[in-house]
Amino acid sequence: MTTWVALVVVVLMLASALAVLLLRSFVAAVAATAVVGLGLTVLFVLMRAPDVAMTEAAVGAGLSGVILALALRRLGLWRIEDNGRGDGDA
Amino acid sequence: MMSLTLEGVVLIGALGLIVIGALGMAISNHLFRMLLALVLAESGANLLIVLSGYRVGASAPILGFGDPTAPMVDPVPQVLVLTAIVIGVGVQALAVALLLKVYRVYGTLNVRELRDRMDADVATAAGVEADASQDAPAGERPLPPVPAHASVGSGGFGRRGPVPFPPQSDERRP
């Protein structure tokens, strides 16, 4: 049962890791990075490391997402609707 | 069908994250996406280190709950990863600060545009005319990479003589 949970989470993580590289919108890419961090949290719980999971959820997913989103605003890449004209496709 | 174990699944996930992160750092042409790929690779490395301390059927390494003589997973990789997560966020913040400086100076984060503008800036600071890039050669034809007189009459390495810097702008006129 645990194995199947881990399998679903791993597939979700790898899909969103590919989405980080393939999405044109940078806001969506940052959100996909946060999804990878949350999947990592679940895997840490399954690996019997609850303290690492707490730190990853608070720091890796939360603080890192906030830092990257604020950087997006400063860098002028914060465009929610990105119709064509994204200057950074992978 | 192969038997599907928890360690195998997590190992595939960790290696996949590392590979995707390294690939993204290699093929991205935008600096911010390189930073995101670095975050992915770092997550995969953390997962791999925690996986190295895992034991099948062991409990979490916390004393005070249940039997203290029961087998526990190795707490040392977990502590290392706990440190590495926090350091990773510090590295991200430093990278974001560097990206902000680059964006304020050059106004773009695209790698190709940045390379062209940095070449132009270096040429301006050195007092020579701007070097021709591979995309837009200056003359009618691009220069050969090695001058003809440098490779004649020398049999080994290190016989090519000093490379003049800055290069004279006359020698790129045909």
Image (cartoon, coloured by chain):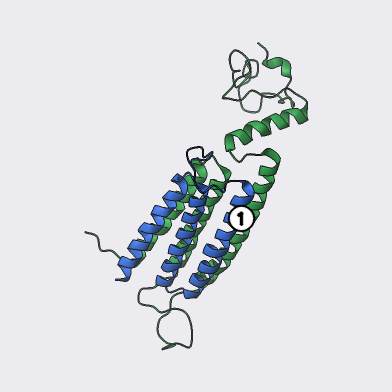
In the depicted view, which residue is nearer to us: B158 or A36?
Answer: A36
Q: Give the crowd class for mark 1: few <14, some 14-19, many >=20 residues within 10 Å.
A: few
In the depicted view, which residue is nearer to us: B45 or A12?
Answer: A12
Measuring from the top left, give residue B138's x and y in whole percent. Answer: 63, 18
Q: In which quarter of the image is residue A58?
A: bottom right
Q: Mark 1 points at which residue?
A: A70
Give the chain coloured green.
B
Count of marks overlaid on the render: 1
The amino acid at mark 1 is Leu
Q: What residue appears at the point 56 percent right and 50 percent down from the top-left corner?
A: B35
Q: Determine the secondary structure under disc 1.
A: helix
Protein chain holding label 1 = A
In the depicted view, which residue is nearer to us: A24 or B84?
Answer: A24
Measuring from the top left, give residue B163's x and y in whole percent. Answer: 71, 25
Is residue A1 positioned above or below B42 on the image?
below
**The colour assigned to chain A within the rendered structure:** blue
